[in-house]
Every structure is written in structure tokens, then in C-alpha cells.
Image (spheres, helix red, strand yellow):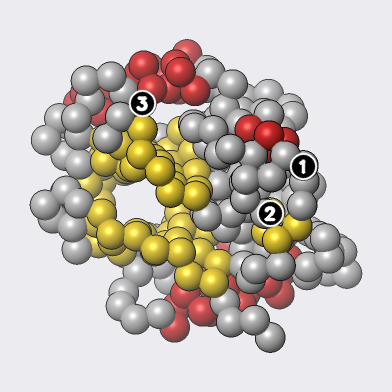
Amino acid sequence: MKSVLQLTDLHIYEDANRTLLPIDTKESFKRVLNFALADGGKWDLIVLSGDLADLGEAASYAWIADTLSEVDIPTIAVAGNHDDREHLKKHFECPSAINLGKWRISLVDSCPLPGVTGELRAKELATLREHTEAYPEAPHLIFLHHPPVALNSAWMDAMGLKNASAFWDCLDNQDNVVAVVNGHVHQNFDTYRDGVRVLSTPSTCTQFVPRTDRFELDPRAPGYRRIELSEDGKINTEVKRIPMS
């Protein structure tokens, strides 16, 4: 069994006095991280699924990397629409795929252009198909920033993955894909698409109310997702939120 900790949408600022609607994102991230570390069991991998920084500032990534260096857990990252790739890749490994035990984990960049909407380039799709086809016996877990399905939230779905159909076409006949996990939407969402589990995860800072036509802040606490990867190719996952103060 391998345990993956997903942390997403940190929105860290260089300015220690700046907040996000109106959460202190650094303090909130540290609380979520410490809560996860206090959770029972060992973490084998941390996945940061985008929007590590809010303004793409170099100091934001340095602060996150320094904070995570104290926990000594392998960490990989994929870009979000708020991220600066140069700064991100200076401080974090951003592989297109890794092996974790018997599992194959792919990270797909859904943010090729400025703006909040996601899109997958032909190169990203080709690489993803290559990875899934090259390891037909390995159960596969995919991370990207934008959700590849509708969340029944009008304002958020307008900022989703524009070419989601191309993503799913890429996975046609790939029976080894078990789940797809994303960030971006600051909320918990759990569904299936053609037998593949699709999971969205709360932010480590502000939360958005699910299934609304317009933007609305959710008073629920920040959190993280635990993903347990079993040797037989099954996953067990749950979202955990920090205690409300």
C-alpha cells in the first residue's frame, strides 16, 4: 500500500500580510500540512496539483519548498493557472510520470496559456497516451489542475478544461486508468466517467460552494486528500479538513 498526500491551490503570496478572501494562505497551508502529518500512517508521496503561488512570485515557491523540506517526503508538482513555470520548476520536480510501487502516476499540464480556463496541448495528450500504453499492466493515476468533467457549477464549469473530450479520447481503451485527480475548484467532488473515478479536492486555503451558478465562498475548513494505492490496483481515498477554530 502506498499513501499519496494531495495538497492543492495553496495561493501563497510573497507579502506575508496579504490574504485571500480573507485567509492567511501561509498559515492555512501550515495548518493543513501539520494536520496531514499528524494523520495516522506514513506518506510516500506529496502531489501539489497547481496554484502553488497566487501571483507566481519566486519567493512564494521558495517558501513552500523550504516549508516542505522539513518533512522529508518526496514531492512532485504540476502547474496551475496562477503559477509561473520557471519559478515552479526551480524549486520542485515536475515530471510527466513516475512509478510508485506498482502504480504509474502521470502529471498533465492543463495550463498552456494565460487565463483561468484549461486546455491540453497535443504534446501533453501524446505523452499521456504514451505513458498509459507503455505500462499496460500498471494501474494508472493521473493528476492535472483543471477538472476534466463538469461539476454542475455554472461559473466554475466555464473555467474548466476546454478540450476535455480530447483528454477522454486519449484514454479510450486504456483499462489501466483507475482515477483522475484535479485541483482548481476549491471543493470536494467525486464522480465516475466511463468507469474512471474523477476527484476534485479542497484548497489548503479558501473554499468554494459546490454546485452554484455564481461565485460563493464556502465557510468549510481547508483540507487535503489522502489517496491509498493498493497492490491490487484499487484506490481508497478521503478528504480531511482541519478542525474549525
Q: In the rendered image, which quarter is residue 230 located in?
A: bottom left
Question: Mark 1 — residue?
Answer: 214
Residue 128's disc is 3
Q: At 20% across and 41% down in the image, what residue appears?
A: 139
Residues tagged 1 and 3 counted as in contact (Cβ below 8 A): no
Residue 244 shows in the view: yes
From what the image shows, is residue 32 above or below residue 203? Answer: below
Element under disc 3:
helix
Is tag 1's residue or tag 2's residue first in the polypeptide sequence?
A: 2
Instruction: Looking at the picture, tell me which residue is in the foreground, 70 or 111.
Output: 111
Q: Earlier in the sequence, mark 2 or mark 3?
A: 3
Q: Amino acid at mark 1?
A: Arg
In this view, 53 is above or below 136: below
Q: Is residue 122 left or right of residue 158?
A: left
Q: Residue furthest bottom?
A: 245
Q: Position of residue 60 (x, y in %)?
A: 72, 57
In this view, which residue lies farthest toward the right? 17
Q: Between marks 2 and 3, how big is the CA–CA gap? A: 30 Å
Q: Which residue is mark 2?
A: 208
**Quarter of the image with the N terminus in it:** bottom left
Q: Is residue 164 left or right of residue 238?
A: right
Secondary structure beneath dot 2 equals strand
In the figure, residue 195 lies in which quadrant?
A: top left
**Quick check: can you spot residue 129?**
no
Q: Position of residue 113 (x, y in %)?
A: 68, 24
User: Which SS class for mark 1?
Assistant: loop
Residue at position x 77%, y 52% in the image: 216
- Three-letter code, disc 3: Leu
Residue 70 at what x, y percent from top left? 51, 75
| Residue 105 versus residue 201 in the image, above or below | above
